[in-house]
Image (spheres, grey):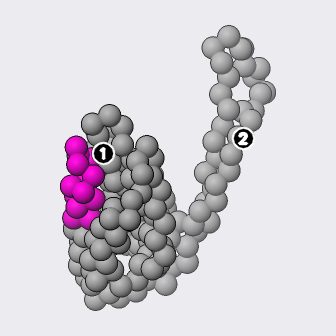
Amino acid sequence: MQVSMTGRHVELTDPLKQYVQEKLQHLKHSFDQVVDVHVVLSVEKFRQCCEITIQASGLTIHGSHETEDMYASIDGVVDKLNRQLKRYRAKMRKHQASPENNTPAIQVSHRILATASEEEELAADQVPEVLEVERMSAKPMSVDEAVMQLELSEQRPVLVFTNQDTNSMNVLYRRGDGRLGWIEPEQA
């Protein structure tokens, strides 16, 4: 397990590093496929925050916790990650018991477009400029598994996947109120 630590407005002392390493060993016992861990410790006035991002066998798990004590923040985020990993393992056991779907992943792209400012008038034939293109694959999975993937990654706002039950492309997204939205095409 490769661990990297970053301190923002906080000195990474040896006892603090050792405490983080000790707590991360508990995660390794909970989930043996952990490959890479990145820890960010930050202090802003009275808020002391610990963020941990885990790369584990094709899965990214992110958690953060904020308190007035750095050690309590570390404990809080490790507890959150342990709960997430336990939930993930339980769902994976459930999915391993179900038959596998051999539907291949669909390649999709996500484009970020430039928009015109309020002063500019758009010509009828003007096409917006593409600022950035991200390519991803819409992997086949059940809706439960997609929800779990989106919950495990606090940083990802949208997940595009192929629904195993319908073999159609679906979108799961995080709404402004914190709940999840699910877009599924309807049959004509």
Indicate the quadrant containing the N terminus: top left, top right, bottom left or bottom right: bottom left
Q: Residue 7, can we see it?
A: yes
**Rendering coords of residue 63 (x, y %):** 33, 58
Q: Earlier in the sequence, mark 2 or mark 1?
A: 1
> Would residue 172 be visible to someone looking at this image?
no
As drawn, 91 above or below 68: below
Viewer-side label of 2, 1:
1
Callout 2–callout 1 Cβ contact below 8 Å: no
Q: Quadrant of residue 170?
A: bottom left
Q: Which residues are magenta?
A: 65-79
Q: Quadrant of residue 171?
A: bottom left
Residue, far front: 14
Residue 176: x percent and y percent? 34, 37
Residue type for callout 2: Val
Mark 2 lies on residue = 130
Q: Where, by quadrant of the figure, is residue 96 drawn? A: bottom left
Residue 169, x across and y down, in percent: 49, 62
Hey, what amino acid is under mark 1?
A: Gln
Q: Is residue 78 left or right of residue 141?
A: left
Residue at image position (36%, 37%) is 44
Residue 67 part of the magenta-drawn span: yes
| Residue beneath the point at 78% across and 27% down | 125
Instruction: Identify the residue position indicated by label 1 in the image.
Output: 48
The answer to whether 101 appears left or right of 152 in the picture is: right
The residue positioned 40% from the left and 48% from the top of the image is 10
Helix, strand, or loop for circle 1? Answer: strand
| Residue 183 part of the magenta segment | no
* Closer to the camera in the image, 176 or 183: 176
**Spatial separation of the CA atoms under disc 2 and disc 1:** 39 Å
From the top left corner, tell me how far across and down residue 151 is, in percent.
Answer: 32, 59
Q: Nearer the viewer, residue 95 or 178?
A: 178
**Residue at 64% from the left image edge and 59% from the top image edge:** 135
